[in-house]
Image (cartoon, rainbow, N blue to C red):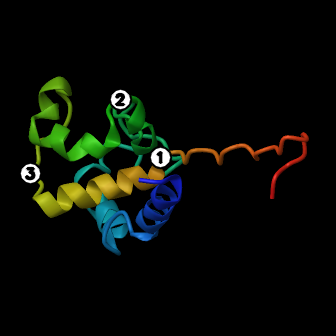
Amino acid sequence: MSMSHVLILLSLLALQPEEPPGFVEAGHKVAVRNCGECHALDNGSVSRMPEAPRFEDLHTLIPVARLGEALDKGWYAEMPHMNVFALGSDERAELTAYVLSLQPKAPPPPARKSRKGRKAD
């Protein structure tokens, strides 16, 4: 596959939404209902329970894309103060989408320089 084909494919993939519309908002509702008693749910807020990590910091504990899996496998055993609750697969996906929306975005790549030392367009 040529480089131009790869670039076209990546461009098309970038146009596709990562999750269905409304998943982030629905995930926030799941978080409020099940997690808000202890965890800080929004960027910049403080957890009510000091040992409960803020949602914006979860990426430092676990790859957030695997949050649903961690809840399924009983993350509760490692967190004795954590309430036990059951989430359906849609709710797990929504909660994961919400937590991912809080994570720091990767910085843009640095501007490329041409061979003559000037920035490329």
Q: Please, what is the three-letter code of the amino acid marked with disc 1?
A: Gln
Q: Dot 2 corresponds to which residue?
A: 61
Q: For residue 33, say whether it is visible.
A: no
Q: Dot 3 corresponds to which residue?
A: 86
Instruction: Determine the image quadrant of residue 110.
Output: top right
Q: Please, what is the three-letter code of the amino acid marked with disc 3?
A: Ala
Q: Image check: 12 left or right of 79?
A: right
Label pair 2/1, CB-CB below 8 angstroms: no
Q: Secondary structure at mark 2?
A: loop
Q: Which of the numbered marks, if any, corresponds to residue 81?
A: none
Quadrant placement of the C terminus: bottom right
- Between circles 2 and 3, the one closer to the viewer is 2
Instruction: Determine the image quadrant of residue 92.
Output: bottom left
Q: Residue furthest bottom?
A: 21
- Binning the other alpha carbons within 10 Å of mark 1 as few (below 14), some (14 to 19) or many (20 upward) gives some
Query: In the image shown, does 74 or 13 lie closer to the viewer?
Result: 13
Which residue corresponds to the image point at 39% horizontal and 40% vertical from the top-left?
48
Q: Image check: 113 left or right of 1?
A: right
Q: Please, what is the three-letter code of the amino acid marked with disc 2?
A: Leu
Which residue corresponds to the image point at 41% horizontal and 63% vertical from the top-left?
13
Q: For residue 39, say whether it is visible.
A: yes
Q: Which of the numbered marks, if any, corresponds to residue 103?
A: 1
Q: Image check: 120 left or right of 33?
A: right
